[in-house]
Amino acid sequence: MHFDSLCAREPKDPRTTKPHILPIYASSAYAFESAEEGMEIFTGKKSGHVYSRYGNPTIEAVASKIAALESAGTGVEAAGLLLSSGQAAVATLVMGNLKAGDKILTQGNLYGGTTELFIKQFGALGIETILTDLHELDRVEEMVKADENIRLIYFETPANPTLACVDIAALAGIAGQYGRLSAIDNTFATPCLQQPLALGVDYVVHSTTKFLNGHGNSIAGALVSRHTEQMKMGGAVWQSMKLAGTNCNPWDAWLINNGLKTLALRMERHSSNAMEIAHFLETHPAVERVNYCGLPSHPDHAIAKRQMKAFGAMLSFELKGGVEAGVKFMNGLKMCTMAPTLGDVDTLVLHPASSSHLNIPKEVRLANGITDGLVRISVGIEHAADIIADLTAALEAC
Ligand SMILES: *Cc1c(COP(=O)(O)O)cnc(C)c1O
């Protein structure tokens, strides 16, 4: 089956007499037919459900579907878990694989919450995070070779705010060569545009809150891995989910299930719209620079082209007029929504300097590439002409 068909189909229903659409199994626990059956399920001799923090049919059906999408056509066998948020997915990955004294090697431009989670929470528990430029592969290899305690290379590509991309196969290759783990946040690309398992990555993380759900109505995360034994009942990652209670809930899983059916269609439209808008912005006199990894002018275009089927919805651009122009631009928008999220079907626009980064010292903001006139767009699936008309009017205002 093709990726698009896999997206559109209902996941395998765990029941023998099946409703057409996956039900929400709103049940905290599961009854046993007999004491013997209970014993067999508890000891893993028979598959079955016990308690919904350990596993739930709705959640498992959707987790398996995401694992199937990440591995579709790759020949890699993978298993998935659905967690309460993207952050919970990252936390479960680290708790299930690392211990005090271990180190994470990563990039400085991760999703802000991930950087904070690594440095503040895991730092306090004795897991150190080293930030470096993951474009510099020779240096990454030297660092890994020199320090046995680096157990995980963690990356995000494309990444905020400049849509910087790193070489997935090369980083996974270094991790594998020295017996370390690699993990990627695949939220921006989704498995529709980029399948990191095929490039050798061990773990794939998602904030399903964004494109996988696509409709902005739930917070959840996913973790997919080729190390299926770690992910199944009794495995180390599964156990971290069970004991820390980072599991998703059946209602949010059900919403993701609805969203996944149109993922292939949405990503195709997101990508073609974003390309059109990137070209439009690139020639606009009020715009200094456009960051879209699909443009040949982007410094990582060659990497993106090698590992992505299309370039997705996310782009950013720099207004010549700085903070003041940013505020005027935002107020000039009529159709596009001002919101600090991404991945929904409608176009979402953010001017970090006057919103999400207002309370962050200017030097820190600039060091992270969030310049005064930077505007981020999560391009939606509306008609491209309507988005361009709205942007045109707003650009005239600044
Ligand atoms: C939103 C986001 C996260 C965090 O996900 P939550 O679902 O909000 O916990 C992680 N990585 C990326 C790239 C994101 O956009």
Image (cartoon, rainbow, N blue to C red):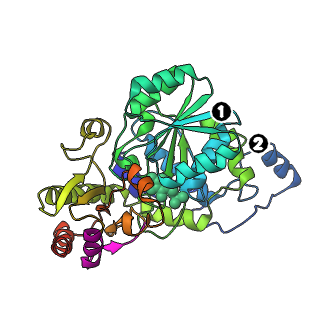
State the image coordinates of residue 190 (x, y, percent, origin top left): 40, 50
Residue that mark 1 sits on: 102
Number of marks: 2
Q: Is residue 22 magenta?
A: no
On the image, the x and y values in percent for residue 1 come to 37, 45
Q: Amino acid at mark 1?
A: Asp
Crowding at mark 1 (Cα within 10 Å: few <14, some 14-19, many 20+): some
- Which numbered marker is on residue 44? 2
Pointers 2 and 1 in contact (CB under 8 A)?
A: no
Q: Does residue 127 appear in the picture of this structure?
A: yes
Residue 238 location, quadrant: top right
Q: Provide the secondary structure element on which disc 1 rests.
A: loop
Boundaries of the magenta span? 324-340
For disc 2, the neighbor class at 10 Å (few under 14, some 14 to 19, many from 20) is few
First in residue order: circle 2 vs circle 1: 2
Q: Nearer the viewer, residue 360 or 40?
A: 360
Q: Amino acid at mark 2?
A: Gly
Q: Is residue 72 left or right of residue 287?
A: right
Mark nearer the viewer, 2 or 1:
1
332 relative to 210, above or below: below
Task: Return the residue nearer the eye: 41 or 383.
Answer: 383
Residue name at image x 51 percent, y 27 percent: 175
Where does residue 130 sit, x and y in percent of width and height? Answer: 54, 36
